Amino acid sequence: MLKLTYTEHGLHLERAAAPLEVLIAQRVVLAIRAGQRLHIEPGTASFLLAANTPGLAQLRRSLQLEQPASMTLAPVDDEFVELTVHGSWLAETVEAQEGVFVTALSHPTEMWVIKLWEATQAQVTFLA
């Protein structure tokens, strides 16, 4: 399962070992025990990957095998492609800008996404 955490400092992507349903259930229990609101809804999340990153062709092939199709890859410009994933948004309110987005994909696809995300972050950090 992939977990995208949106904070005021940006986006953090990681692979979580827990199944999607377990992670969501844990978040619900945590919110109840902490006396906090929790809004959960299906949705999509998008982020950029470097278009010249080695492995992008493998991700494209892996996406074709995903059933049901839960991700799309679209060119943005010469430097980036946009990866859009379907999953669940967990936040304190409907309007929240910070929260967690979770999605379950096949293991190979998740590994390619993580690898390409890390390569893109290293490349963007190097350019900055």
Image: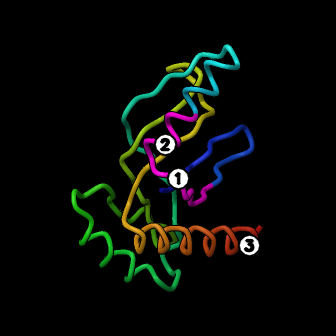
Residue 103 place in picture, x, y as percent? 43, 50
- Check disc 3 and give the amino acid type: Leu
* CA distance separating discs 1 and 2: 6 Å
Q: Earlier in the sequence, mark 1 or mark 3?
A: 1
Q: Which residue is mark 1?
A: 18
Residue placed at 31% from the left, 69% from the top?
A: 63
Task: Please report the residue visible at 47 percent of the width from the left and 35 percent of the height from the top.
Answer: 89
The residue at the point 44 percent across, 66 percent down is 81
Specify few, some or many for label 1: CA neighbours under 10 Å numbering under 14, 14-19, or 20 or more: few
Q: In the rendered structure, does residue 100 fall within the stretch colored magenta?
A: no
The answer to which quarter of the image holds residue 82 is bottom left
Task: Give whichever of 52, 34 is nearer the camera.
Answer: 34
The disc label shown at residue 22, or none: 2
Crowd rating for badge 3 (residues with CA inside 10 Å; few <14, some 14–19, many 20+): few
Which amino acid, by three-letter code, is at mark 2? Val
- For the record, the magenta segment spans 13-26
Q: Position of residue 40 (x, y in %)?
A: 45, 27
